[in-house]
Amino acid sequence: MSGKSANNPSSNQRVCDRIAMSRVMLLELDNGEILRGQSVDVSPRGALMETDIPPEDGLLGVAGTLFLISKEGEFSIGYPCRVARVGVSTIALEVDKSAAAAFGNYMAKDLLGY
């Protein structure tokens, strides 16, 4: 049983499980603003990014491009995404479905050290 039901509105609606992972991330919003942070966890469809500067109000739903920086300092390709949730010092990002396979592949390779 998945735990999702009409009788349980607080059930977890995530499609993929999260994995703890700490990487430097850059989020370039469509308005040109750039946010820098550290990933807390990732899944094939998204990431939770902790920021040094509290996120501004009004970010929910804003589109952007997510870049991950490897341990060696190399930038990943850009993954289109949108802001799914905003916390006191975190931003939850949902990677666009069109880029989910590539994002998941990058995460797997990075986690496995390929």
Image (spheres, rainbow, N blue to C red):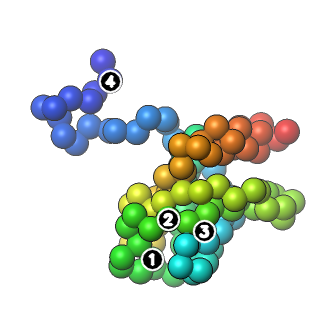
Q: Nearer the viewer, residue 55 or 97?
A: 97
57 vs 63: above or below = below
Q: Which residue is mark 3?
A: 27
Q: Amino acid at mark 2?
A: Ala
| Numbered circles on residues, count | 4
Of helix, strand and loop, which one carries label 2? Answer: strand
User: Which comes sooner in the sequence, label 3 or label 4?
Assistant: 4
Q: Spatial distance from mark 2 to mark 3, Cα to Cα?
A: 10 Å
Instruction: Using residue 92 as the reference point, say whether residue 5 is left or right of it.
Output: left
Which callout, 2 or 4, points at the residue further toward the start of the chain?
Answer: 4
Instruction: Say whether marks 2 and 3 touch (CB < 8 Å).
Output: no
Q: Position of residue 36 (x, y in %)?
A: 62, 74
Give me the residue at 63% from left, 61% from top: 66
| Residue situated in front as seen by the camera: 97 or 90 | 97
Q: Which residue is mark 2?
A: 63
Disc 2 packing (10 Å; few <14; some 14–19; many ≥20): many
